[in-house]
Image (cartoon, rainbow, N blue to C red):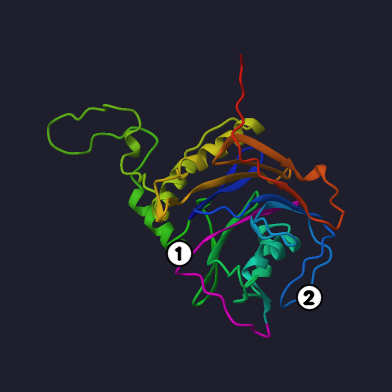
Amino acid sequence: MCTASNYITDCHYFGRNFDYEISYNERVTITPRNYEFKFRKIDDIKTHYAIIGIAAGIDGYPLYYDACNEKGLAIAGLNFAGNAVYREVEDDMVNITPFELIPYLLGKASSVAEARELLKEINLVNINFAEELPLSPLHWMMSDGSDAIVIEPMAEGLKVYDNPVGVMTNNPPFDKQLFYLNNYRNLSNKNPENTFGGDFDLDEYSRGMGGIGLPGDLSSASRFAKVAFTRANSFSASDEASSVGQFFHILGSVEQQNGCTFIANPDLYEYTIYSSCYNTDKSLLYYRTYKNSQICAVDLNREDLDSTDLINYLLINEEQFNFIN
């Protein structure tokens, strides 16, 4: 269960909440231009765009959860249990595994428009990364400064949807999520007029009454509506600190607290392990974790992007207190 969003001020911002019950030692991973991407069913790619993102702690291969390339194209993979369908190899298609999709698209495409063309030939094949790491059922949100799409591997084929609301969660499929927003078309950031009927007055007893009916539970459909409303009505100054801070507040509207979503005994709950924010125009990655609310940052441009070796930074996962006396 996760949530992804974009946000645009003077720059384009993209990121996600990673909600799960188990951490896989996530780290910031930078893939320089000359790291050789090895693929299971297509030729290896020796040179490509540089990429920064958050990946599982697997040595030797960047298993990205979300990432951005040096051209400003960003993507996140979210759980899509019960709907994701991966296929057998097809000779006339570009056969890549789901865990190869982010490296393939970000390595070759500089925009959503270019990624759309690549997706026309892609067949996501049912090949595990390793026996102990089976495939996760995923769908993806991709965004740049002018466009956003959702990519869903369905039983009837690979679906690519325009994303006019700039957010994505999990189930149901994206077209149904968009349709369900019709249930909330009466919501507003302003207090409503009294249209109840009758000859009596009804009081505005609180600010925020225009949002009555906006769901607050942690289901994926409810988070979709909540974060779509929050993003659509967000306001901030356009400087970096204001934009990044507002983006984390957008994600914070649907973050999950440990203990609220029970998974299994003993004491296993889904929670927001980390939240990420990319300034895709400047190749900056910001993040905070469940145990560290301070915003940390990594700058892609401060690394040797022409090298051949992965660059990793473990997530800072201890609270950083700023004493002022």
- The magenta segment is 66-92
Residue 134 in the image: x percent, y percent?
A: 58, 70
Label 1, on which residue? 173
Are circles 1 and 2 on residues that touch, CB within 8 Å?
no
- The front one of 133 and 310 is 133
Q: Secondary structure at mark 2?
A: loop
Q: Is residue 138 magenta?
A: no
Please, is residue 276 above or below residue 91 in the view?
above
Q: Which residue is label 2 attached to?
A: 43
- Which residue lies most toward the top here? 325
Q: Is residue 320 above or below residue 167?
A: above
Q: Residues within 10 Å of mark 1 (few under 14, many from 20)?
A: many
Q: Residues within 10 Å of mark 2 (few under 14, many from 20)?
A: few
Is residue 119 left or right of 309 when viewed as pictured? left
Question: Which residue sits furthest bottom?
Answer: 91
Q: Say above or below: 88 vs 36.
A: below
Q: CA distance from mark 1 to mark 2?
A: 32 Å
Where does residue 16 sit, x and y in percent of width and height? 56, 49
Residue visible at 37% across and 44% down in the picture: 216
The local secondary structure at tag 1 comes to loop
Image point (64%, 69%), residue name:
119
Quick check: 246 left or right of 41? Answer: left
Displayed quadrant of residue 153:
bottom right
- Amino acid type, residue under disc 1 in the picture: Pro
- Mark 2 belongs to which amino acid? Asp
How many badges with numbers are in the image? Answer: 2
Q: Decide which of tag 1 and tag 2 comes sooner along the chain.
A: 2
What residue do we see at 62% from left, 24% from top? 322
